Image (cartoon, grey):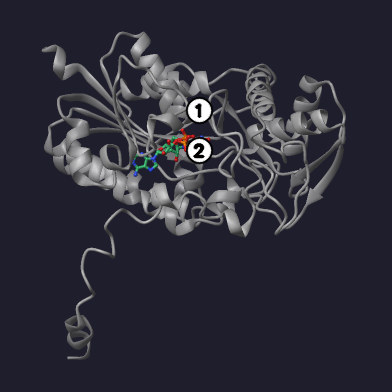
Amino acid sequence: MAASSRISVVTGAGGFIGGHLVAALRRAGRPVRAVDIKPIDDWYQVFPDVENLAGPLDGDCRDFSVCRRAVRDGAEVFQLAADMGGMGFIENNKALCMLSVLTNTHMLLAAQEASVPRFFFSSSACVYNAEKQVNPDITALSEPDAYPALPEDGYGWEKLFSERMCRHFREDYGIQARVARFHNVYGPHGTWQGGREKAPAAICRKVIAAKASGKHEIEIWGDGNQTRSFMYIDDCVLGIRRIMDSDIYEPINLGSSELVSINQLVDIAETIGGVKLKRHYKLDAPRGVAGRNSDNTLIRKYLGWEPSTSLREGLAKTYAWIEREFHKQVESGEAAALTVSTFSHGSKPIPGDGFMVESRHMDTWKQGIPVGYGDRAEPKPAVAGAARG
Ligand SMILES: NC(=O)c1ccc[n+]([C@@H]2O[C@H](COP(=O)([O-])OP(=O)(O)OC[C@H]3O[C@@H](n4cnc5c(N)ncnc54)[C@H](O)[C@@H]3O)[C@@H](O)[C@H]2O)c1
């Protein structure tokens, strides 16, 4: 095989999981092409010896010509690019989340057109039927529980649709598509502030901020009894690569099965930080489903493996990284409000709380309506006429 045809293409490479995946592929000696709409200075991890397609012009996978360039000579495509975030983000940005369908469609089309043999799609536990997640002491979700379809509105519907598109591209065109449903991934080099971060990073940041300010209080979204499982990033990357190299055709769970409540997550973060905080529960904040866990029967059966890093171990590493980032910001004077640990609607944003109506579209300049949509041509009056006629 020619060296050029071994390229692993990773989209969303400037993000959390993409950055770690590029690092792992690179360590394994694979030539990598890394693609992301964000300017390269905003990527979590950058490797100069990797081919980087960055920024709105070279790295926007909603643009079909960018996708064509991205997949050239690719042996495998890892399609991770998506507009996403924690509950505060996805509940307030449904249209934006659904626009990721453009990215998924164009990347699949480009990969199929270029005869790329393998395609990985990062789906989510948000595809699961909401009615099966109404109790905190939930039975873990197994793969068939996605149907009948009642996924998370917006983000989950888009993921479910794109899953099925992968299936039909495989059946109709032969591309070897693999689909993993990630359950809450956390770890260093990920979003910990700004509104898109998920619970583990947000809780770590709030504990760190409370310690730094001496104001020993923490705000928790919901009543804290909602349950989740959290997968450490190293398990996620290993799972992605194993699923990609496998013959697993159907969407499969990739998540930890260690179920904890948000209150227990806070307990662990407090233990790591060596502090005890007074808890305030914000009952009207976005909280997602009542309970969600990953049933790992299928992945154990197929791979003889499942994510196994304990939350205590993974969170300690994550906490240490966020603490360093936090103090870097404080020292640089970038974040005057970092030590505040509570918020309300309309208050100054705490880095990362993100439940502010004002901050909903904070980076739409980068990730909003695709460049050129709507400003390419005037709407044609004939459309209205046609409808009438
Ligand atoms: N992190 C989790 O817990 C989790 C859970 C379920 C599913 N996922 C999925 O895993 C994938 C990676 O998630 P992550 O946590 O690394 O998120 P992330 O936000 O850190 O990374 C996603 C990256 O995609 C990029 N992107 C967005 N639109 C793009 C476009 N049009 N073209 C090119 N790049 C674009 C963003 O700039 C970002 O860097 C996503 O598809 C996400 O939906 C993540």
Q: Which residue is mark 2?
A: 142
Asked if the residue under mark 2 is in contact with the one under mark 1, i.e. CB atoms within 8 Å, the reply is yes
Q: First in sequence: mark 1 or mark 2?
A: 2
Q: Is residue 371 visible to us here?
A: yes
Does 56 appear above or below 129? above
Q: Check disc 1: other Cα within 10 Å, few if <14, some if 14-19, many if 20+.
A: some
**Image location of residue 263, percent across then percent down:** 78, 37
Please identify the quarter of the rendering in which residue 32 is found: top left
Q: Check disc 2: other Cα within 10 Å, few if <14, some if 14-19, many if 20+.
A: some
Does 143 appear above or below 375? above
Does 332 appear above or below 340? above
**Image location of residue 292, percent across then percent down:** 61, 41
Ligand 1 sits in quadrant: top left
The structure residue drawn at horizontal position 80% and vertical position 48%, both measured from the top left corner, is: 281
Q: Secondary structure at mark 2?
A: loop
Please identify the quarter of the rendering in which residue 168 is found: top left
